[in-house]
Image: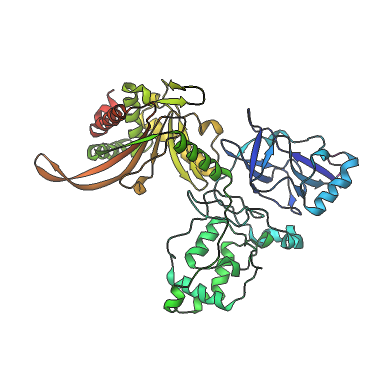
Amino acid sequence: MGIHLIKMPDLGEGIAEVEVVAWRVQPGDAVTEDQILADVMTDKATVEIPSPVHGTVAALGGKVGESLAVGAELIRLEVEGAGNVAANHAAAGAAHAAAAEPASPADLGPDRVGPDMGARAAAPAGATDKGAAAGARSGAAAQDRPATAGSGAAGTGSGAAGAPGASGRQAPGAGKPASAPAHPARAVAANATQQRRPALRAEGDKPLAAPAVRKRAWDLGIELQYVAGSGPAGRIGHADLDAYIAGGAHGHAAGSADERYAQRDGEEAVPVIGLRRKIAEKMQHAKRQIPHFTYVEEIDVTELEALRVQLNARYGNERARLTLLPLIMRAVVLAVRRFPEVNARYDDSEGGGVVTRHQAVHIGVAAQTDAGLMVPVVRHAEARDPWSSAEEIARLAEAARTGKAARDELSGSTITITSLGALGGIVSTPVINHPEVAIVGVNRIVERPVVKNGGMVARKMMNLSSSFDHRVIDGMVAAEFIQTVRGYLECPATLFIE
């Protein structure tokens, strides 16, 4: 047996270090060629690191949340044959494997990372649960293996980070509890069962589970501390929750008021790592550096919605189906022609700063994914009709959701549009995507009575809540820009004329 050392590959120009956001394997696990070993995050994206060889994990090069330099040791594998570490270091490598400690940089040997070790876009959302199928591979070593740092976190959307586990991955944006149990009767029964069963884990020993499993357990009122996991290292899956409920929770009637309002104790420390940390840093920087000016305007989109429905009815089978977003994008493109100072980026790093106005309109579309907030970019929106924009939005949204968006698809925007669709609320105060100087927020459409021509009529109304960098955009310019957008949207035929 030999030791094969895998170093952190160069993931792109200008990247000096990356952050480990999840380990897909643990010491003692058998791995195959091209199997994903870890998820790491650069400044732009999360990428997967595959194994170039078959082997068994001997030691990991760092903990979740740690930064590793390009060329640093990522992981050691025990392989058949001599491996790629010099013979005089083999004993030291074995000692490191036994202690499950990161190897010393002095032990690094020649790198044999294959050509496929480049950046692969990572799936952003919660890990899959392999269940008992991986038990034969891990054996008793998996049961005795200590959990890695950050292995107990979970949630959704813009919440906290998820648990990597032995077969999962860290999911930033996981772990946000529901406001109330989705199934109160089942939650009561689960609580009653928990009162009868002793905890399966020692106090402070966090159970491993994917974000979706944690959310489901929360909705059902089940404490994962009491659930036996059948996956590697005791990882809990949906099947384990089903087995727990079937073991007695269904047999109880809805309990007393005391059971329904049982006191919950305990807390969970959720490390802010990966995409969640990047979002936190960027938001903090934007709010600290940029004096935001928010302008809200009401828009009558009755005619716009009617036109959109007609266009989809006529061209729906031939061209991409239109949502409201590509039509708003077209209105922004036309308004930018009159107000080029809005389509700009402000570099405030030196002296008085420099504002760069762009002729190209690269529109960032803020999108919420299971991994957190991402802003894929529709490039050259000025050269696209609404159908072309709709196709590109759909492609980028799917790439962002599945973690396959390339780095250049998530950067380089000159102005951003953010929308939460039906959850858009009445008013919002969007945060500018630094170093841009403007962001257009789209609120939800509400049908309500409006006075028109002296009478009350039902109209579809929508607000635009937009923020501007008040250092370089005056209030009058911001207001005129949004009023221009409003004019195009309330007279939608002009979107196709100019």
The quadrant in which the C terminus is found is: top left
Q: Residue at x 43, y 28 (%)?
A: 414
Q: Position of residue 345 (x, y in %)?
A: 44, 26
Q: How is the image coloured?
A: rainbow
Q: Is residue 419 above or below residue 223?
A: above
Q: Is residue 451 above or below residue 223?
A: above
Residue 240 part of the magenta-drawn span: no
- Can residue 316 be seen in this snapshot? no
Quadrant in which residue 475 is drawn = top left
Q: Is residue 259 left or right of residue 494?
A: right
Q: Residue at x 25, y 27 (%)?
A: 494
Q: Is residue 286 left or right of residue 237?
A: left
Q: Which one is in front, 367 or 405?
A: 367
- Can residue 78 be seen in this snapshot? yes
Query: Which stretch did the figure color magenta?
Result: 81-85
Q: Position of residue 463 (x, y in %)?
A: 29, 41
Q: Residue at x 68, y 48 (%)?
A: 63
Assign the magenta stretch its main secondary structure: loop
Q: Position of residue 429 (x, y in %)?
A: 36, 41
Q: Which one is in front, 164 or 382?
A: 164
Residue 82 part of the magenta-drawn span: yes
Label total for image = 0
Q: Position of residue 51 (x, y in %)?
A: 72, 42
Q: Residue at x 76, y 54 (%)?
A: 28
Q: Which one is in front, 285 or 342?
A: 285
Residue at the far front: name it. 351
